[in-house]
């Protein structure tokens, strides 16, 4: 039986996130695209696929540049980002994320600049591999960032959120590569699209199952509509990636579906977080359940 719930005039307990959806939703999406695309760029270099390497470098630089613009726009003043670099605090996801961005962005820029000019190729290759090493952290640190809040839909999903973001980022980077890479070189991207989509779907389902009643914030309203659209687009994009082969048009359409699916995932997660702060039930009932579970354990109080 569900715990009886009462609230003071049914007022919400938490304030909704002050972040703007367009800015921070875009920041979450574009950062994921950039980080995963760096891995594709390095893979293209290693395997002799210049088209894949170039597409990954372009997507990484474009993604991280626009991501930083969205972040600074939401912060209001660029110096707020720079102030985060005055100290290093491993317990702060925002601080660690700022240092990751500060290390990653120049590497991506150097990699793309040497690609365009043809000068200093060794430095360019080293920068590309360095960006690929940091790239996975760029794709997932934002999951830790949102989970390290009091927002029920984000905080309670902390176990699966990094896997959800990693799968989503892999799928969207694969989609971008499928659009920009010649069919003769896009086999790794098509395989990664299937893997990323599977990881995204499984992590999302597991998270909602474990969240219990808080999962309602992901299943109803704007968040529910966005995440249902994301699942449909992701399945269609992955299916297209499987059968695309050397069919250029199908690869482009599948890639666009995967990129749209990932955007819907990030916006859906953001919307679910906002919705979970508006209903005090999502805050109080899980807390009471945790207290009751703790009290029922031997020696619990």
Image (spheres, helix red, strand yellow):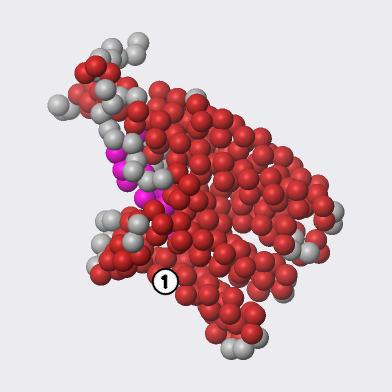
- Image check: 240 left or right of 222? right
Q: Which residues are magenta?
A: 137-152
Residue at 66 percent across and 70 percent down: it is: 53
Quarter holding the C terminus is: top left
51 in relation to 287, above or below: below
Residue placed under numbered mark 1 in the picture? 103
Residue at 57 percent across and 64 percent down: it is: 62
Q: Main secondary structure of the magenta part?
A: helix
- Image check: 292 left or right of 213? left
The verdict on residue 245 being magenta is no
Q: Position of residue 120 (x, y in %)?
A: 59, 89
Label 1 secondary element: helix
Quarter holding the N terminus is: top left
Query: Is disc 1 surrounded by few (<14), some (14 to 19) or many (20+) residues within 10 Å?
Result: some
Residue at 45 percent across and 62 percent down: it is: 68
Residue 65 appears in the rendering: yes
| Near-viewer residue (101 or 74) | 74
- Residue placed furthest toward the right: 247
Q: Quadrant of residue 100?
A: bottom left
Q: Position of residue 294 (x, y in %)?
A: 23, 27
133 in relation to 178, above or below: below
């Amino acid at each position: 039986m569900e715990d009886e719930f009462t609230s003071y005039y049914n007022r919400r307990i938490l304030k909704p996130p002050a972040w703007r959806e367009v800015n921070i939703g875009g920041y979450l999406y574009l950062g994921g695209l950039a980080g995963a695309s760096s891995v594709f760029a390095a893979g293209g270099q290693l395997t002799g696929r210049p088209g894949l390497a170039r597409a990954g470098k372009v997507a990484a630089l474009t993604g991280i540049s626009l991501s930083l613009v969205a972040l600074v726009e939401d912060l209001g003043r660029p110096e707020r980002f720079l102030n985060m670099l005055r100290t290093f605090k491993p317990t702060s996801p925002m601080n660690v994320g700022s240092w990751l961005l500060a290390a990653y962005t120049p590497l991506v820029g150097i990699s793309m600049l040497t690609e365009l000019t043809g000068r200093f190729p060794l430095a360019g290759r080293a920068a590309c591999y360095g960006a690929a090493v940091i790239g996975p952290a760029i794709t997932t640190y934002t999951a830790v960032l949102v989970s390290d809040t009091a927002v029920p839909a984000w905080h309670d999903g902390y176990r699966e959120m990094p896997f959800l973001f990693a799968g989503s980022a892999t799928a969207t980077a694969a989609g971008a590569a499928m659009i920009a890479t010649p069919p003769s070189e896009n086999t790794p991207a098509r395989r990664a699209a299937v893997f990323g989509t599977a990881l995204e779907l499984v992590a999302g389902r597991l998270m909602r199952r474990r969240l219990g009643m808080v999962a309602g914030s992901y299943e109803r309203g704007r968040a529910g509509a966005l995440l249902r659209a994301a699942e449909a687009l992701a399945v269609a994009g992955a299916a297209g990636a499987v059968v695309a082969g050397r069919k250029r048009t199908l690869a482009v359409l599948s890639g666009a579906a995967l990129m749209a699916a990932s955007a819907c995932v990030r916006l859906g997660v953001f919307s679910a977080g906002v919705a979970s702060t508006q209903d005090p039930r999502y805050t109080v009932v899980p807390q009471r359940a945790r207290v009751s579970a703790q009290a029922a354990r031997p020696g619990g109080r």
